[in-house]
Amino acid sequence: MVNFEFLCPTKIVFGKGTEKKTGELTKQYSDKVLLHYGGSSIKKFGIYDKVVKSLHEAGIDFVELGGVVPNPRLSLVREGIQICREQNIKFILVIGGGSVIDSAKSISIGVPYKGDVWDFYTDKATAKEAIGIGVVLTIPGAGSEASDGSVITNEEIHYKRSANSFFNIPKFAIMNPEFTVTVPKYLTACGAADIMSHVFERYFTQVQNVDFTDRLCEAVMKTIIVNLPIVLREPNNYDARAEIMWANTVAHNELLTTGRIGDWGSHMIEHEVSAIYDVAHGAGLTVVFPAWMKYVYKHDINRFVQFAIRVWNVDLSFGSLDAIALEGIRRMEKFFKDCELPVRLGEMNVPNKNLEKMAEKAVEFGEIGNFVKLGESDVLNILKLAL
Amino acid sequence: MVNFEFLCPTKIVFGKGTEKKTGELTKQYSDKVLLHYGGSSIKKFGIYDKVVKSLHEAGIDFVELGGVVPNPRLSLVREGIQICREQNIKFILVIGGGSVIDSAKSISIGVPYKGDVWDFYTDKATAKEAIGIGVVLTIPGAGSEASDGSVITNEEIHYKRSANSFFNIPKFAIMNPEFTVTVPKYLTACGAADIMSHVFERYFTQVQNVDFTDRLCEAVMKTIIVNLPIVLREPNNYDARAEIMWANTVAHNELLTTGRIGDWGSHMIEHEVSAIYDVAHGAGLTVVFPAWMKYVYKHDINRFVQFAIRVWNVDLSFGSLDAIALEGIRRMEKFFKDCELPVRLGEMNVPNKNLEKMAEKAVEFGEIGNFVKLGESDVLNILKLAL
């Protein structure tokens, strides 16, 4: 185990009807907010009305900025920053999932910053302050409601980059699993894949003696493996939706990183795929991870054997350590396929071109990953394995 | 799953050498503190000197109050309150384990309170403010460094009672597992038993559909089951000590309660035993829990079967659900015995008398427990099963 510091400052308010507390919670921070959201679904399903009612009851004024899309765009972030500055807004209330939260996080660090907000995503600047954020979560997956990261796409130059800051971790997250029952099947699966991938990035570490956090990681993975098929069959199953929603937050609030060093190579490779082809992040990950695993598993075969046995119930009698490890990866692929998620680039209609370009961009700032350091040729090999 | 709110505000600073940050962390709250601790072992093993060095370097003045004993006493709490008031001290720095932290928590809510601090422990008052607390943890078990509870013994009347307040949750906890290698074998085992018991109280719930937190609970239990025997054999094993220390905090910071309703009947029964006989809390719990489990398991046999199978690796082929559940309890008893912990009252030299008195006191404020509501005769039956 390596030394660590841990503090997750997000207050979680979880369960049926909790959106009624939005006004009261927001009021603790500001009387005027930027109400940030994505498309029309929150209006169609009545979520918008419920939240706005609570804001009205608490006497909170708001300026709206909708239109966030998956792989949220820098242009809208810039628009949000301008609105907040012009109207002296010091708090952002999000209704949505990871894309909207990430957009809000970017706005929150951009507002007080003198330079261009893209600087935070190109290692040219580190955020030193931010305006506050509150979240009404509607799609679990990104875990952004209690994490310090945001991922933004600069659509002009096809770059998707992340920035981390303790300052933009949301102050509160209201999580009503009822709001997630209308998430379409494919997006539900993509969200769950994102959750799994957040755990993979932490689980596959070269740090030894991480028993406890291994088991916490396995708790999240098993919860998804059990509950995702249930919600795909029964979209209205509150209990299974609730399990996924809460596991989603814990998967990414850094508890599972305590004492470990995460990898994050696969996320960086996926960012290059979705920057060009605009695929759903979760789907991109179910394509990249099997390839990454096959490429790196021999670097710590015991860890992949543990993954196979504990998470995928592979029997020791399956054969050699190699056979057990590969069977674990195979079962993971089968699970994703059973959930109608892609496991190869072609299944996402990503053609066999631009692989070299993606590999080149992925290592733009140097080698990626920690479990194994990956250079350009490694990334290219992984992308080829994903074909 | 039931609705919940969750926020653990304690900043964890974990690992080798982290005590060097004590001064810097304390400085964020105050320049003058009450330095609260227990016996001489922190001086003998150099922990006191390291912490004091860091305080000196940060220019922090301190007033000392040592002498906290296991089952911490109300009289010392009162002394601490008086010192803080007289010397205008607004922050308490703890060096120690659960007893010292609980004593500090009691002082922290007592200082600004006009009445008698014991009021908080007899449901006569609820804390509305507190002075701050920081912790340098030396004994894992109580999980008090990131919890909202304190348990104090009123030694004049032999009452041991708890009080909970969000206000006295420590601001930070410095956790260097090296500091725990000198904890004697028996106290190490008692601490681990306390950790297990904190999970039991949460695991045995009548709330259904709590998959994810079940698995988080199991992660803690398995971590203790694997690592406690290691540290008993190899007291200097940093890695195993670290696993126990971190599992200890997560076991009791309320993450494992999210969406569930805990039981806490066994803790209340144990408090009556140790209020009279002053036994180690962890040891009292390894005596009470097997008896409690045998008394209540039929109220949700499936949960006890899950406990047996997932935590104690009992095979389904063991027979009936009853047989599987009882085998799980038997293996738990064997585990405690192997760790040289008592599992019967007699093994703690608690005689077969005063059982009626304990039962009467346990239900003084009404029935206890949530998994099954226990009245006076139930408590007496459980105590008899523990003989």
Image (spheres, coloured by chain):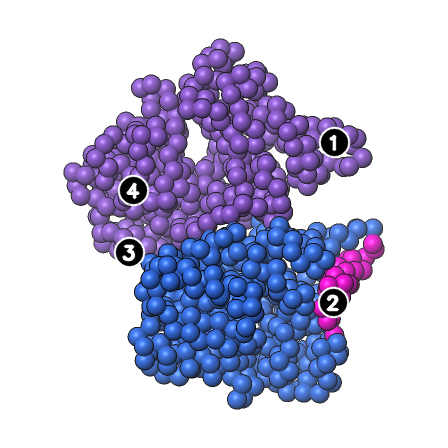
Chain colours: A purple, B blue
Mark in front: 3 vs 2: 2
The answer to whether marks 2 and 4 mark residues whose Cβ atoms lie closer than 8 Å is no
The answer to whether marks 3 and 1 mark residues whose Cβ atoms lie closer than 8 Å is no
Read off the residue under disc 4: A128
Read off the residue under disc 1: A321
- What subunit carries mark 2? B
B204 or B199, which is in the foreground?
Answer: B199
Queried whether the magenta region covers residue B138, the answer comes back as no
Give the number of the disc on residue A28: 3
Q: Which secondary structure dominates the residues rendered in magenta?
A: helix
Residue B380, image quadrant: bottom right
Q: Is residue A92 above or below residue A297?
A: below
- What subunit carries mark 4? A
Respond whether the residues carrying marks 3 and 2 are from the same subunit: no
Find the magenta span and give its range: B318-345
> Which SS class for mark 2?
loop
The answer to whether marks 2 and 1 mark residues whose Cβ atoms lie closer than 8 Å is no
A26 or A181, which is in the foreground?
Answer: A26
Queried whether the magenta region covers residue B332, the answer comes back as yes
At label 2, the amino acid type is: Glu
How far across and down, in percent of the image, does residue A118 sit?
30, 29
> Which SS class for mark 4?
loop
> Which SS class for mark 1?
helix
At label 3, the amino acid type is: Gln
Cα separation between marks 4 and 1: 47 Å
- What subunit carries mark 1? A
Cα separation between marks 2 and 4: 52 Å
Other residues around mark 3 within 10 Å, as few (<14) / some (14–19) / many (≥20): few
Cα separation between marks 2 and 1: 37 Å
Other residues around mark 4 within 10 Å, as few (<14) / some (14–19) / many (≥20): few
